[in-house]
Structure formats: C-alpha cells, structure tokens
Image (cartoon, helix red, strand yellow):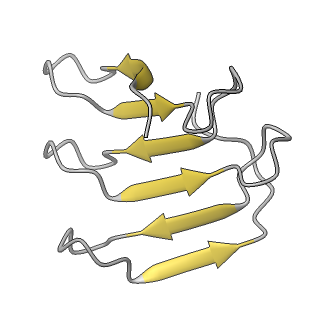
C-alpha cells in the first residue's frame, strides 16, 4: 500500500481523524479511514473500487476489535470531506 495521501486532524485534539489514501497510485483517493468517535482508533473504512470518486464499499468496526460488524456494498455515496 502506498503512503497516505492526506492526513486530516479535525477535532483539535492532535489525533488523526481521517486518512485518505491512493492505494493504486493513479493520483486519486480510493480509501478513506475514519475515526468517528475520536478515540484514536479507526472504525469506518470506505473504498472506491471503481475509480469514479464515490464510495463503493463501507465497512464499520463498531467495537474496534479489527473485524467489521457491518459491510455495505454499492453505497455510491460521497466520501468524507
């Protein structure tokens, strides 16, 4: 996997809240990893598998144990800003 394209800290607590990555080196973000509750651990993972800039798969790890409890396919929504 390539290096993170952009790291965003949005809460003012110096923790990374959003990682945006270009995993296939095409110059466009295709993976978003989000810490939604501010505890410093990611719990939402979103993927653009088609390269059109929209989210195709969302995985949610509610208890942050490393295994997603919910996977949504074909979401097509916009990624986090």
Q: Position of residue 57 (x, y in %)?
A: 65, 64
- The quarter holding residue 40 reads top left
> In the visual, does 40 lie left or right of 25?
left
Q: Residue at x 30, y 20 (%)?
A: 9
* Quarter the N terminus occupies: top left
Task: Note whether 60 is above or below 80 in the view shown.
Answer: below
> In the visual, does 52 lie left or right of 27?
right
Depth check, front residue: 63 or 24: 24
Task: Note whether 79 is above or below 62 in the view shown.
Answer: above
Depth check, front residue: 36 or 51: 51
Q: Residue at x 39, y 33 (%)?
A: 18
Q: Position of residue 15 (x, y in %)?
A: 17, 27
Looking at this view, name the residue that lies furthest to the right. Answer: 52
Q: Position of residue 21 (x, y in %)?
A: 50, 32
Q: Residue at x 44, y 31 (%)?
A: 2
> In the visual, does 68 lie left or right of 52?
left
Q: Residue at x 21, y 68 (%)?
A: 64
- The quarter holding residue 16 reads top left
């Amino acid at each position: 996997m390539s290096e993170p394209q952009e790291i965003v800290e949005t809460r003012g607590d110096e923790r990374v809240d959003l990682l945006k990555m270009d995993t296939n080196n095409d110059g466009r973000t295709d993976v978003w990893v989000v810490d939604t509750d501010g505890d410093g651990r990611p719990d939402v993972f979103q993927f653009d598998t088609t390269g059109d800039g929209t989210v195709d798969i969302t995985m949610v790890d509610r208890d942050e144990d490393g295994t997603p409890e919910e996977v949504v396919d074909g979401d097509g929504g916009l990624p986090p800003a």
